[in-house]
Amino acid sequence: MVHKEEKVDVHTSHAFQNYNKSMGGVDELDQSISLYRIRIHGKKWRWLLFTYMIDMAMVNAWSMQVIAKEEPMDQLLFRRMLLFRQILS
């Protein structure tokens, strides 16, 4: 016998509603970071945290650049541009 699924309305608190509403941004950030993650591995957890923070800063800077400019720039090209600017300065 096949049971038909019913939709049941469940009341959730305001905190859960806000959390679920803003989770899309976290998913986009994690996806963007995973595209060009720093691949140098260290044995300490501090190194992983440090490289994750650098990756997060790079993705945030890239997304701000995309919003500010009319021409969208690829994230890899943006990272290379930042790297060359740091090397040349």
Image (spheres, rainbow, N blue to C red):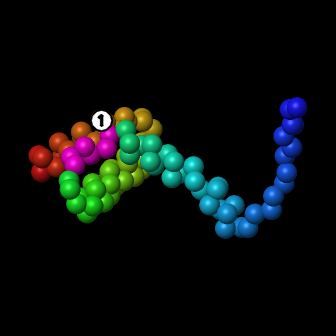
Q: Position of residue 25 (x, y in %)?
A: 53, 51
Q: Which residues lie in the magenta part?
A: 36-41
Q: Is residue 53 magenta?
A: no
* Residue pointed to by mark 1: 77
Q: Is residue 70 in sight in this rendering? A: yes
Where disc 1 sits, the SS reads helix
In the image, residue 9 above or below residue 80: below
Vertical comparison of 47 with 13: above or below: above
Query: 8 or 87: which is nearer to us?
Result: 8
User: Measured along the vertical axis of the image, is residue 18 above or below residue 82?
Assistant: below
Q: Is residue 50 visible?
A: no
Across and down, in percent, residue 62 comes to 37, 46
Viewer-side residue, 16 vs 83: 16
In-front residue for pair 44/65: 44
Q: Which residue is more in the foreground, 60 or 43? A: 43
* Residue depicted at x 75% and y 63%: 12
